[in-house]
Structures are given as C-alpha cells and as structure tokens.
Amino acid sequence: DTEVTQTPKHLVMGMTNKKSLKCEQHMGHRAMYWYKQKAKKPPELMFVYSYEKLSINESVPSRFSPECPNSSLLNLHLHALQPEDSALYLCASSPYPASGITGELFFGEGSRLTVL
Amino acid sequence: AQSVTQLGSHVSVSEGALVLLRCNYSSSVPPYLFWYVQYPNQGLQLLLKYTTGATLVKGINGFEAEFKKSETSFHLTKPSAHMSDAAEYFCAVSGTNDYKLSFGAGTTVTVRA
C-alpha cells in the first residue's frame, strides 16, 4: 500500500477544460514533487516544493500550475492542455528537504491523464 | 552534473535464474545511487539505495546492489527470479545538495516460466 495517495487515477479532459490532480501524504515529509512520465520513459521532474514553498520549477509551461495548500497536500492545476501533455503524472514526497539526499522518494500510483 | 546509463533496455530471464541489471554512473561529486522498480500501472518504489558506508547494499524483495567506485557501477542482482519481478527498473543518481534525481532510461524485465 502506498502512503502517497493520488486522485483521480484516470482523467480525460478536453483542451479547453480546467481540472486538478491531487496528492496527499501523511508521513510528515516536507518535500513534495510532481513528475511527468511518458510510456516506457523515466519520470521527468516538473516541480519541487520544500517546506510548502515552490523551490524548483523545471521550466514547465504555465498551463500547469502547482499548489501546496499545506504540508500534506499537493495539487496540480491543469488548464488549456495539449494532447502531447497526455501522460502519467506522479506525485512523490521525501523525508529530506530539497537540498538534502533527494533521491529517496516515495511515489504515489499516479494519475493517468488523457487530453483529447 | 550526474547521470546514469543502464545497459540493456530489456532483460529476459527464466524463473529461478539470476537477475542482473547493469547501471553505470557519472558524477562530479560523491554519488548517491538508487534503484527503483515500477510495476505495471503503478508508481515507482525504492528497491535500495547507496549513500555512504558499506558498498554492498541489500534491498527489498531479495535484491542487492554493489557500489564499485573504480568501475563507476551500481549493478542490481537477485539470485533467483520470480514471476512477480517482471517490471520496469530504473537506476538513479543524485549528489550532495543536488535537488534533482537523474534517472536512467530504464530496463524492462520479463520472467519466463
């Protein structure tokens, strides 16, 4: 059982829709991440939050908007997406702040997004 | 900057046979090395990690890996494959004060009955 919970598991949206992906962890971790993963590829880092503040944005297009309402929650707001944005979106958390041993990540099962 | 190269995008083994997945790293600082596994339609799960200390690292599900600085390698092994080991395996590296985890391209493991 994963301790990082992502909802929804599947999402289909049109290019004009606005939707959100949600992530929750209750391990007391202070760093949270969004990754994007295309089929048969490794995950690509999108955003890093450390102590609830956005610390890293990997030059992600503005149609993706992250939000960290508190230390347990992480959202990814989606607007005006393109078909090429279809992918598995993974949330992860880490017991180490973003400047520490950043490889020990706990991943959720992901939200599979399809943009029509 | 850190990077890893996984040798072989696909490995097929018989049930009960040795599993060997190869990973070589490049790092300008002492590396932290990791192996993650991804089962179909799931997220990634940490199998094992090397940070400092003992170079032979044991992980979950019977896997282990050995850090060899002279060979810049961190190969993953399991003595006896099980059908449940069929998955995608990613080697990854980070460094001190490095916010980013660099993943290899991944190796798909299939297990034949």
Image (spheres, coloured by chain):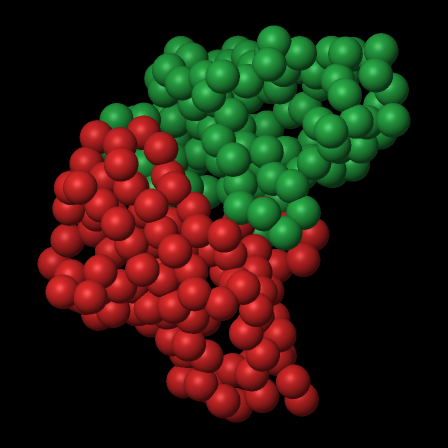
Chain colours: A green, B red
Q: Quadrant of residue A27?
A: top left
Where's residue B69, x and y in %?
15, 61
Q: Is residue B23 shown above or below A64?
A: below
Q: Quadrant of residue B55?
A: bottom left
Q: Is residue A23 shown above or below B17?
A: above
Q: Residue at x 42, y 60 (%)?
A: B6
Where's residue A10, x and y in %?
78, 36
Viewed as shown, does residue B94 lie left or right of A62? Answer: left
Viewed as shown, does residue B110 lie left or right of A107? Answer: right
Can residue A98 be seen at all in this image of the molecule? yes
Image quarter of the C terminus of chain B: bottom right
Total number of numbered discs in the rendering = 0
Q: Residue at x 84, y 23 (%)?
A: A13
Where's residue A95, x and y in %?
33, 35
Viewed as shown, does residue A108 lie left or right of A99? Answer: right
User: As rendered, which of A1 and B12 lies closer to the eye?
Assistant: B12
Q: Residue at x 55, y 18 (%)?
A: A60
Image quarter of the N terminus of chain B: top left
User: As rendered, which of A102 and A36 lies closer to the eye?
Assistant: A36
Q: Residue at x 68, y 24 (%)?
A: A21
Where's residue A35, x and y in %?
54, 33
Q: Is residue A21 shown above or below B108?
A: above
Can residue B84 be seen at all in this image of the molecule? no
